[in-house]
Image: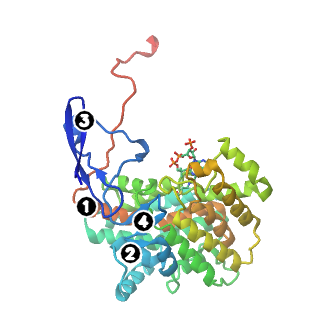
Amino acid sequence: MTDKATLTIGDKSYDLPILKGSTGPDVLDIRKVYAESDHFTFDPGFTSTASCESKITYIDGDAGVLLHRGYPIDQLAEKSSFLEVCYLLLNGELPKADEFAKFEHNITYHTMLHAQFDRFFEGFRRDAHPMAVMTGAVGALSAFYSDSINVDDPREREISAHRLIAKMPTIAARAYKYTVGQPFVSPRNDLSYSENFLRMCFAVPAEDWKPNPVLTRAMDRIFILHADHEQNASTSTVRLAGSSGAHPFACIAAGIACLWGPSHGGANQEALEMLETIGSVDNIKDYVQGVKDRKYKLMGFGHRVYKNFDPRAKVMQKTAHEVLGQLGHNNDPLLNVAQELEKVALNDPYFVDRKLYPNIDFYSGITLRAMGFPTNMFTVLFALARTVGWISQWKEMFEDPTRKIGRPRQLYTGATHRDYVPVESR
Ligand code: ACO
């Protein structure tokens, strides 16, 4: 096996070292191409470019495989808990019992927000999208933690990671409570991570809130399924923002902003709205024709990396059935529409030829709606769960001694030098 490739430009050749990962495609090392050949490489959308070296998450999109630190996502979703997955992503290994107890304690005792922080929420309009509130609120959190500004100190990085994982449910629940005009519910440290979050969202002063173990487990599993996904758009945003040495909470706010878009985390809201638009199984044929006529996309279908079933979608589908069964919504018309639509699309050459399969968002919306979340909260839940992935990747970036500020180049096609023309002469 050769360990280098050769790039030939005109009559000159350049060696490109080939780097090998522990699995997955080898990588051509082009770091010296510009210095040696005076050429940039061109890859908008980063379809062929590895932006970093990472040991956290591995995806084989053709085989439909997703591993966190080597562990398959379906095993983690089945056997682990979200907090244990957080530890795994951050530290690289599953925790021993005493390590987990310490970690759980650290997260649990950082769940409160500064009392003054609540005033930030009041600055937003009541009809603000909760993702707008999240972007602003998490950015504002950096103003409360100027003590963790030294990103080069591993202990400060660890404290920031713990604070973020701990406080995100409290902020997300407040974003929800604010938009529905209900009083904020404080965290309770005797509850599990997911139970505490559900309580902060759904408890009201007028009546007792009763935990439902099936819904708590489903929430925890949904968080596990969204915890990390290697160098996707929002994670790359967090890494890029962090590469300048910016405050970690501000970097996470940048990740939240990126996640909001409908091509990324916003797709779960759009997927549910699409199912509502279709409304009934009878309308599927016409809707699918509209997709093929390129009037709109089938939301919750397709993925940049998976050209096979998204392994998270399979777990999500099972979770949807469990939740709807528990709540007695087995005949939810939207579930029928989703199942039939999936069947139609998976047998239609338009989708088969393009390798378009359901992604995680296809079934998550139905599940979250049944659990009581409004559609505009779906992406917020995604952001809450993905925070651990973002901060683990951010932390890994700082542990890499070769870290550089992220600074892509461009293929410039604009005007070349021209002299300024005064307005009366234009
Ligand atoms: N519906 C219909 N056609 C689609 C869809 C879709 N959902 N997705 C891709 N295609 C078509 C494209 O039109 C294109 O067709 P063409 O080759 O005839 O022009 C072909 O499939 C390839 O699509 P690309 O846009 O090149 O694929 P890309 O990797 O850039 O996009 C993306 C991936 C953005 C996820 C896309 O599939 C999409 O928009 N899906 C719907 C939104 C969605 O569900 N996003 C969630 C992603 S998962 C997540 O973030 C958690």
Along the line of sight, the residue nearer the viewer: 213 or 252: 213
Counting from the top left corner in percent of width and height, residue 108 is at 45, 80
The amino acid on which the numbered mark 4 sits, given as a three-letter code, is Gly
Q: Nearer the viewer's eye, disc 3 or disc 2?
A: 3
The amino acid on which the numbered mark 3 sits, given as a three-letter code, is Thr
| Residue 169 appears in the figure | no
Q: Is residue 361 above or below residue 73?
A: above
The residue carrying mark 3 is 8
The amino acid on which the numbered mark 2 sits, given as a three-letter code, is Leu
- Which of marks 4 and 2 precedes in the sequence? 2
- Which of marks 4 and 3 precedes in the sequence? 3
- Which of marks 1 and 3 precedes in the sequence? 3
| Element carrying mark 4 | helix
Q: In the rendered image, which quarter is residue 126 located in?
A: bottom right
Residue drawn at (57%, 53%), measured in percent from left and top? Answer: 356
The amino acid on which the numbered mark 1 sits, given as a three-letter code, is Asp
Q: Nearer the viewer's eye, disc 3 or disc 4?
A: 3
Q: Residues within 10 Å of mark 2 (few under 14, many from 20)?
A: some
Q: In the rendered image, which quarter is residue 271 located in?
A: bottom right
**Is label 2 in contact with label 4 (beta carbons under 8 Å)?**
no
Give me the C-alpha separation between circle 2 and circle 4. Answer: 10 Å
Give me the C-alpha separation between circle 2 and circle 1. Answer: 18 Å
Badge number at residue 400? 1
- Which of marks 1 and 2 precedes in the sequence? 2
Q: Residues within 10 Å of mark 4 (few under 14, many from 20)?
A: many
Badge number at residue 389? 4
Along the line of sight, the residue nearer the viewer: 303 or 379: 303
